[in-house]
Image (cartoon, helix red, strand yellow):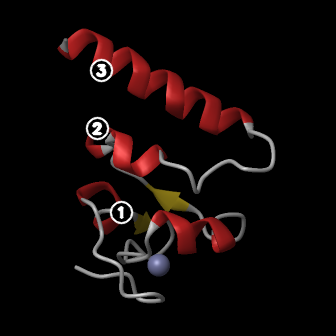
Amino acid sequence: MHCRACDTLLSDFESTRRNANTFEFVDLCNSCFKEVKHIIPVIERKDLITSVDIDDDLDTEGEPEDYKDFKDYIVHRNFNED
Ligand SMILES: [Zn+2]
């Protein structure tokens, strides 16, 4: 599965992100999705998030509260897997 906007190969997390109203797959990479995330309610498979999904593109201009939780989740999970 590739991003509908930029054709980047999607991670499992990205390719399973669904519109919370229509339940259709959003099919956008994190980079493209962040442009529309404020207007599209989505259901995300947080269990599929990997470090790839929290890479450089998500938070260059301040961190919304949910992304802090997001990162804490990853750090916590990685810690447990080690
Ligand atoms: Zn994209």
Residue marked by disc 1: 14
For the residue labelled by badge 3, is the local secondary structure a helix, a strand or a loop?
helix
Residue at image coords 60%, 52%: 58
- Looking at the image, which is closer to me, 22 or 16? 16
Query: What amino acid does circle 1 point to?
Result: Glu
Of the residues tagged 3 and 2, which is closer to the observer? Answer: 3
Amino acid type for the residue under numbered disc 2: Asp
Disc 3 designates what residue?
Answer: 78
Q: Is mark 1 within 8 Å of ligand 1?
A: no
Question: Label 2, label 1: how many angstroms apart (C-alpha)?
Answer: 12 Å
Amino acid type, callout 3? Asn
> Of marks 2 and 1, which one's residue comes earlier in the chain?
1
Q: Residues within 10 Å of mark 3 (few under 14, many from 20)?
A: few
Query: At 41% from the left edge and 88% from the top edge, which residue is drawn?
Result: 4
Q: CB at mark 2 closer than 8 A to ligand 1?
A: no
Of all residues, the one furthest to the right in this rendering is: 62
**Contact flag, marks 3 and 2 (Cβ < 8 Å):** no
Expressed as whole percent of the image width and height from the top left, the position of residue 51 reads 36, 40
Lower sequence index among marks 3 and 2: 2
> Badge 1: few (under 14), some or many (20 or more) residues near its Cα, within 10 Å?
many
Q: Residue furthest front?
A: 56
Image quadrant containing the N terminus: bottom left
Please state the horizontal and vertical placement of residue 52, each as a whole percent of the image.
Answer: 36, 49
Within-10-Å neighbours for mark 2: few <14, some 14–19, many 20+ = few
Lower sequence index among marks 1 and 3: 1
Q: CA distance from mark 3 to mark 2?
A: 12 Å
Disc 1 on helix, strand or loop?
helix
Disc 2 is placed on an element classified as helix
The residue carrying mark 2 is: 47
Residue 8 lies, with reference to residue 76, above or below; the image says below
